[in-house]
Image: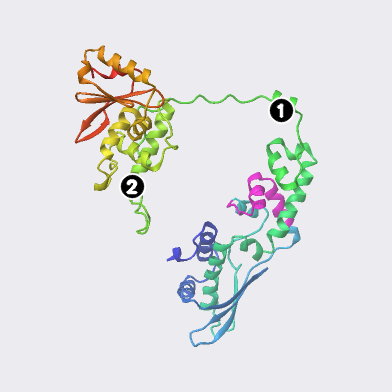
Amino acid sequence: MTALYGHTWWGRQWVQALEKDSGLERRRLERGRTFAGQDRVVSLNIDVGGVRAAMRGSRRLNYVTHLDVHAYDDGALRRFAERISLRAGLVAALIEGDLEPGILEAANDAGIDLLPTVHDLRPRCSCPDQSPPCKHAAALAYVVAEAIDDDPFVLLHLRGLDRRSLVPELRRIRGEAADDPIGAGREDAEVVVAATGDDPGEPARDAWLRPRAPLPPVPDPPDVPGRPAIWPEDPPTDAPFDTPGLLALAADAATRAWSQLRGDGDSALSLSASSDLVRRQASEPVEGVPPVVYGSTDGDRSARAEAWRHGGAAALAAMDEPAWRPPIATMASARAAVESVGLPASALTVHQNRITAPGFQLRITHDGTWWRFEKRRGRWQVAAPPADAPDDLVDL
């Protein structure tokens, strides 16, 4: 039931602390959680030191409900900022408007509680129920989780640690550190730049002379590509893919990465969508992974998949290239080469860039490559890897 409230990491932390660490009676919290789901909040105001809301009661009366928390003073703000300043990642995240989970550790080090603790939440309500928390106050505690989902900086604001004052304080502290080379440290240089706008710099000679750790050797790729893990749950029903499709895509990505590591493949990212479908159909099947399936209207894809196996994207281009007229000398030389391997001149027909013989056809593409085509089911399709000379494709 807790999952109904707190859809982000910070929201879930608030709910868990509320139910486990706040000291509020669990039975009354459960009652308030149910009440919160009935859309009873008329107005909501979150400010330093607590939350105030107008809650619609069961008898159509509006009650004023408060949830007070402890707000910290300027001294606590200073301690908190100092702890954050020691962690470069937290500083950079805050400057970028993000609240990293590591903030909790920095807050604890400074003696600050961002999440509810025992006797920290003080509920008040104008309803007749005098046993805290009443269902209105308990519901309000869960409504706060929704506000934290929308903006985790609500946690800082409640404690009096507003980001608008915290970031300038961090800039000031980091600025002081930047003036002290020992205090700042070269490892924090990028954060100093982000916080102060000033780069302390370093002589190029010193940077080049600084010893560098040797790069670790690149391990040899495994003998076979890795198999993707089984998808833990089905995607939403309205998603444009299904579980077998995701598995097939993951297996294909693993195989392409494996081929690149071996040095005998590429990413295939430059292919068009239609060419990539052909590539995937032509690929060797992965054990346990469903094959690529096409509709009946894609009957020529098996021929294109075979072409891909012979020559990849270049073979598809050869299939799609319209007839064109090469130089006369080129085709005359090609015909002579084909006749030299034993085919009689009467059996050959030359038309534009194609030489047709009994049972096969040779085509030259614009880049000077020759391809052998054979007619299957009434259609010419690539039947062999390419060659630089036409006679190399005759006796196959």
What is the x, y in percent for residue 17?
A: 53, 62
Q: Which mark is residue 245?
A: 2
> What residue type is disc 1 on?
Ala
Tell me which segment is drawn in magenta: 77-101
Q: To which residue does mark 1 refer?
A: 207
Residue at coordinates 79% horizontally, 39% vertically from top-left?
Answer: 180
Q: Earlier in the sequence, mark 2 or mark 1?
A: 1
- The question of residue 99 being in magenta is answered with yes
What is the x, y in percent for residue 162?
A: 69, 61
- The question of residue 80 being in magenta is answered with yes
Left or right: residue 371 versus residue 272 is: left
What is the x, y in percent for residue 66?
A: 61, 76
Q: Nearer the viewer, residue 177 or 83?
A: 177
What is the x, y in percent for residue 356?
A: 25, 25
Q: Nearer the viewer, residue 21 or 50?
A: 50
Using a 10 Å C-alpha cutoff, classify the residue at mark 1 as few (fewer than 14 neighbours), some (14 to 19) or many (20 or more): few
